Image (spheres, rainbow, N blue to C red):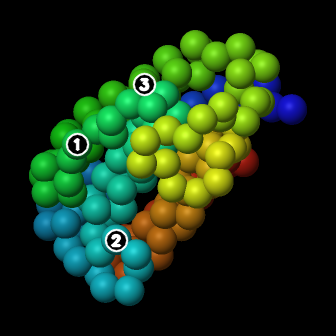
């Protein structure tokens, strides 16, 4: 059984690691943010970040049987745009988690939300998936930083602050 406080902490730590990526990309030449590097899922650092955030929003909105947040990579042209999106998505996810009891968090969805893909799960499973998805793409971004000639330091959860 997952606890709301435990998942909330893991979500907060995940977003703190995304902040490290945003800080690093801010120090790069401006064009590096949208420079395309084929073969790594999403083609640019911006596209990776936007995908992480819009996916989180879509899964959390789906859990609430609400329409996903509209948006596309091109809509977030600057690092500031992505930071605003990140704040909005993180706050919405935290608010959703805070609205659930631990029983609700760990109970399989009673009905299939409109447009839901995959098996019915409990919200805790989906929220954990949000975290693992972010770290999957964070790893791709670390490779992209290296390819762009600007390696990033440690961004793992277990890092020295």
Secondary structure state at the residue bearing disc 2: loop
The residue that mark 2 highlights is: 42
> Between 89 and 126, which is closer to the camera in this rendering?
126
- The residue at the far bottom in this view is 39
Secondary structure state at the residue bearing disc 3: helix
Secondary structure state at the residue bearing disc 1: loop
Q: Distance between the residues labelled 3 and 2?
A: 24 Å
Seen at 27% across and 59% down, the residue is 46
**In which quadrant will I find the C terminus?**
top right
Q: Position of residue 94 (x, y in %)?
A: 52, 23
Seen at 51% across and 55% down, the residue is 117
Going from the N terminus, do you reach mark 3 or mark 2 first?
Answer: 2
Seen at 41% across and 79% down, the residue is 40
Residue density around tag 3, few if under 14, some if 14–19, many if 20 or more, within 10 Å? some
Tell me if I can see residue 88 in this picture.
yes
> Between 23 and 66, which is closer to the camera in this rendering?
66
**In which quadrant will I find the N terminus?**
top right
Q: Where is residue 68 in the image (x, y as percent from the top left)?
A: 33, 39
Seen at 35% across and 47% down, the residue is 54
> Between 100 and 94, which is closer to the camera in this rendering?
100
The residue that mark 3 highlights is: 92
């Amino acid at each position: 059984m997952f606890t709301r406080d435990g998942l909330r902490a893991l979500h907060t730590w995940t977003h703190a690691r995304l902040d490290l990526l945003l800080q690093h990309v801010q120090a790069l030449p401006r064009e590096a943010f949208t420079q395309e590097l084929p073969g790594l899922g999403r083609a640019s650092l911006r596209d990776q970040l936007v995908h992480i955030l819009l996916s989180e929003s879509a899964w959390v909105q789906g859990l609430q049987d609400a329409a996903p947040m509209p948006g596309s990579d091109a809509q977030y042209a600057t690092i500031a745009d992505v930071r605003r999106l990140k704040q909005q998505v993180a706050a919405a996810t935290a608010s959703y988690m805070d609205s659930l009891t631990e029983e609700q968090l760990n109970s399989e969805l009673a009905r299939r939300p409109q447009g839901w893909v995959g098996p019915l799960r409990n919200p805790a499973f989906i929220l954990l998936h949000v975290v693992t998805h972010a770290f999957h793409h964070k790893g791709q971004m670390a490779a992209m930083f290296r390819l762009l000639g600007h390696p990033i330091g440690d961004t793992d959860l277990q890092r020295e602050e």
